[in-house]
């Protein structure tokens, strides 16, 4: 059986790893939220730009304005696609971080359970030892009393 000291070290290490995994997961969640917010802003900007252009196009536009609009929309679409890929990547990283965190929590719980069992085992052993000493003391007291 592992010594109480080694279990304590394992438990402390597991606590640290779990805390580190939680911090890392928090950072990954933040990056994912930022990527999703940026994507949403790009999509909204494209929709607004297209709406405004269509309203102004109702009054008539020249070919240069039309070409500029198409080029800018194309650049926005490219940026949106790139941001969608980034969002997907951050989601994958967040999921991996989430799995890592849950794995660390499971390990911590296992070590904690082992530590609690070892503590109960030690307490039971001490209680038995104290009971044995008390029994020996009582037995010795009665045996010396009978000889008088």
Image (tube, rainbow, N blue to C red):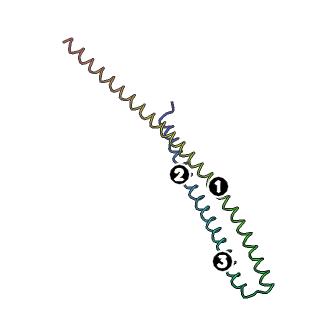
The image quarter in which residue 117 lies: top left
The image quarter in which residue 58 lies: bottom right
Q: Secondary structure beneath disc 1?
A: helix
Q: For marks 2 and 1, give the CA distance.
A: 18 Å
* Residue at x 79% of width, y 87% of height: 62
Instruction: Pick whichever, 88 or 50, lies toward us.
Output: 50
Q: Residue furthest right?
A: 63
The image quarter in which residue 94 lies: bottom right
Q: Residues within 10 Å of mark 1 (few under 14, many from 20)?
A: some
Q: Is residue 95 left or right of residue 110?
A: right
* Residue at x 48% of width, y 40% of height: 112
Label 1 or label 3, whichever comes before in sequence order: 3
Disc 3 target residue: 48
Front position among marks 2 and 1: 1
* Residue at x 51% of width, y 33% of height: 2
* Residue at x 58% of width, y 59% of height: 29
Q: Residue 120: x percent and y percent?
A: 41, 33
Q: Residue 64: x percent and y percent?
A: 80, 84
Q: Residue 66: x percent and y percent?
A: 78, 82
Instruction: Pick whichever, 76 or 119, lies toward us.
Output: 76
| On screen, residue 78 above or below 110 | below
Quadrant where the C terminus sits is top left
CB of mark 2 within 8 Å of CB of mark 1? no
Front position among marks 2 and 3: 3
Disc 1 target residue: 93
Q: Residues within 10 Å of mark 3 (few under 14, many from 20)?
A: few
Mark seen at residue 19: 2
């Amino acid at each position: 059986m592992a010594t109480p000291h080694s279990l304590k070290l394992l438990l402390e290490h597991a606590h640290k790893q779990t805390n580190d995994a939680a911090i890392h997961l928090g950072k990954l969640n933040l990056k994912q939220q930022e990527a999703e917010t940026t994507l949403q802003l790009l999509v909204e900007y494209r929709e607004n730009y297209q709406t405004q252009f269509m309203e102004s196009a109702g009054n008539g536009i020249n070919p240069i304005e039309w070409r500029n609009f198409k080029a800018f929309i194309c650049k926005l679409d490219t940026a949106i696609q790139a941001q969608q890929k980034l969002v997907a990547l951050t989601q994958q990283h967040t999921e991996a971080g989430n799995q890592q965190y849950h794995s660390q929590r499971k390990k911590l719980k296992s070590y904690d359970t082992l530590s609690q069992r070892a503590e109960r085992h030690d307490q039971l052993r001490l209680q038995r030892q104290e009971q044995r000493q008390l029994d020996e003391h009582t037995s010795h007291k009665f045996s010396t009393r009978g000889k008088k």
